[in-house]
Image (spheres, helix red, strand yellow):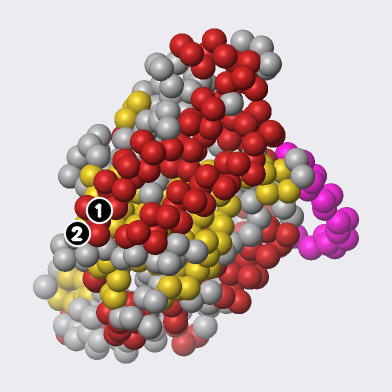
Amino acid sequence: MREFSFVAVIQPQWKRYQSDSALRDDLARFLRVARNKGANVALFPEYTGLMVTGPLAIEKQHTLKKQGGLLSRLLNSLGGPPELADTLPSLITDHSAAITERYTLLFGDLAREFRMTIVGGTMLAQVADGVSQYRAGVFDAEGNLMGWQSKLHLGADEASIAEPGDTLETFDAPFGRFGVLVGHDLLFPELARALAFRGCIGILNPTMACGGDDWRRQRLIASARAQENQIFIAQSFFVGTNDIFVGDSGSLVGKSAVLAPVELSPRGDALLAEMGAERAEGVVVAEWNSDALMNLWQSTDTPVRSMMRSSLFYDLLASEYQSGATLSERVDERRAVPRLPEPAPEPRDEPEALPPLTAEEPQVSALTVPPLPAPIPVTLTPREEEHIEETAEEPTTETEVVETGTDIRDSWLTEPTPPQLPEPLGPLTRTIPVIDPETGRYLGEKPS
């Protein structure tokens, strides 16, 4: 296996050719430039193969005349074939084998002449009874048809005249194994991951974009596919007037490019080569170095290829994929499921009534009451001592006799006798209260 390959992405203008020779000469012009830049692989954009139907439609004018009204469209559409949406259904039904033959002869001959592996862009033909598909042919440097890759996701215009494919192919070349994802198939990460699992070092993406937002979105996705799988991507766009399908308007634009993981890109932006203008024809070439890519798998600080947990992905997504529903359908299904009512609470036994709380008298511990301090001795004067002794010597009687001589027991029958005042004491001595300085308690009196 060679360690490298130079891949050319070709950005031609969409045209409607009136002869096979004019178409071949125009495509050869791009391949000559690519070969001069050292390319040994070439990628044409999506729908390139439909160009072979223009000359075929002109040759079949007499047959188309029977379709009613198509001949007038044929003669009045800018000197070329009618809009493809008008002619393709009848061409595919009646001349599918001729379209396939012209396509394989054209790109096989170009691959052999320029000694290049070529992905010829998509064509439309019947692959089985009543089943038409958009598919791209892959040709080796000898001009042999290596195989086909059908488009797996169709837009509304495409789905009106074709059916999506259901197989994913790989192709072996001297520089390594690669896959082909057509158009918006690259938007689905599962397809790129499947090709990485099958040993592909790169993906060729023939595509087309209507407007700047479209091609930038596809570019962003291509960068993501390169990084998340650590592989190369090549992406090729058409430019020019968009008249492929009835009602289409605007311009075909894009910047065809060759991309790689950021670690292998010179400016760290995932770009190896890119067209300079989004509306100009041209060819860009960049190297797919498989040796450098495999070294990255072993040396990167983010080895996604060995970090990934496939069993986790299976647990998360197996049931979703097996349902066969799209992402939108699956989400809508879950939104439509009514929420179950909350279960009724189970009956509970009422707790027994507790006796009312009564406030108990606080129990004061004797330990909390500070003991009374010892009384302070009071010193009395000699006069006070004499007075106390005199008071103690006076006798006490059980009955008191009034002046009338009546017994105290009969005193309630007579006028009350005013109390006798005590005899005055001797001169009084002034005292002051004695207070315990520690507890603040009153301890008695002492002379002032």
Of the 4 image quadrants, the one containing the C terminus is bottom left
Name the foreground residue: 292 vs 285: 285
| Residue 428 appears in the picture as rendered | no
Tag 2, which secondary structure? Answer: helix
Q: In the rendering, at what x and y percent does residue 104 appear?
A: 52, 52
Q: Residue at x 73, y 59 (%)?
A: 322
The magenta region covers: 334-357
In the rendered image, residue 352 lying in the magenta stretch gets the answer yes
Q: Residue at x 58, y 52 (%)?
A: 150
**How packed is label 2: few (under 14 Cα within 10 Å), some, or many (20 or more)?**
few
Q: CA distance from mark 1 to mark 2?
A: 6 Å
In the rendered image, residue 223 lying in the magenta stretch gets the answer no
Name the mark on residue 32. 1
Q: Circle 2 is placed at which residue position?
A: 36
Judge from the rendering whether residue 316 lies leftward or rightward of residue 319; answer left or right. left
Q: Residue at x 42, y 55 (%)?
A: 109
**How packed is label 1: few (under 14 Cα within 10 Å), some, or many (20 or more)?**
some
Q: In the rendering, at what x and y percent does residue 307 appear?
A: 44, 79
Name the foreground residue: 412 vs 33: 33
- In the displayed structure, 68 sits above or below 401; it is above
